[in-house]
Image: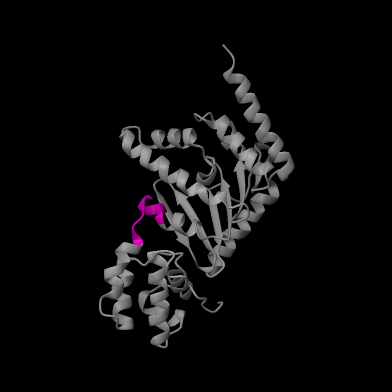
Amino acid sequence: MPGPKDLDPSTSPRALLGAELRHARMKAGLTQDELGRPLFVSGSYIGQMEAGTRRILREHAVQLDEVLDTDDFFARNCEVSGKSRYPDHFAEAAEAEAMAETIRVYEPLLIPGLLQTEAYARAVFRAYDPTATEEAINDLVEARLDRARLLADPTKPLLWTVLDEAVLRRKVEGTKAALRHVADLARRRRIIVQVLTFDAGAHASLEGPIKLMTFPDAPPLAYLQGLGSGQLEDDPATVTRHALTYDLVRASALSPETSLALIESVAEDDAHGDQQP
């Protein structure tokens, strides 16, 4: 595991807390693996808390205070650093995403959140929770669009996404505009996008989506999402297996150039369809 690097504590409360954790661990003369054992987490997990890619959970904060003899410092401060506008099952993944150097995604059903437009995101959230108030839906849409602002940087993170053909064909409100948005990002070389067509048949990730993230100062993560649930994986063997799954999916997909042509064709067909009386 690479050695710790200096953090900028002014960037966020989580960066400050991570820097304090690293300081307290080193003062105690413990490695990341040694500190992880009494918490029943890996050394990689400790490294991610120190780097700020993982929040320090309340139960871990209490244990850290006990092991590192820091009174109740981490217990008192973990709630401030852990506040999030995202659902609990996705909060850690969204926050890690904002710090990632590379993001690789396979999506079998939806345009990925980072690439969604306002109308598309609103339709998705409304379908998931048809009785939610407009205020609640607006908050969710705003949070999703805020996530996408990380693509305003012209070069990082590197986002490579594979879309199942079903994503293109499903008639979600706002799909054509969202597909044009995806195509525009690809045309501007801001993202790499491929399409896994129906003709590809059985493939390595039939059971669901995959998100893989790498970081400059912390080990890689895999995020696996289900209906109203999600899990970050940091076990090296598990992440490596999911990375292989993604590579197999990517190898079965159309080339980026052919994929872009298909996306634009579907978006254009939809546009013409909308003009029909």
For the magenta stretch, what is the residue range?
82-91
Residue at the front extreme, as displayed = 10
Q: Is residue 151 above or below residue 165?
A: below
Q: Quadrant of the N terminus?
A: bottom right
Relative vertical location of residue 118 with respect to residue 229 in this rendering, above or below? above
Residue 29 relative to residue 207: left or right: left
* Residue 38 position within the rendered picture, expressed as x and y whole percent measured from the top left: 36, 79
Q: Is residue 86 magenta?
A: yes
- Asked if residue 103 lies left or right of residue 128, the reply is right
Residue 166 visible at all: no
245 sits to left or right of 126: right
* Residue in view at x 39 percent, y 76 percent: 21
**Which residue is drawn at the image coordinates 54% and 52% (left, top)?**
210
Count of number-bearing discs: 0
* Residue 88 x %, y %: 36, 53
Quarter of the picture holding the C terminus: top right
Pinpoint residue 117: horizontal percent, then vertical percent.
Answer: 51, 37
Percent across and percent down for residue 111 are 54, 40
Query: Can you tell which quarter of the image residue 257 is in?
Result: top right
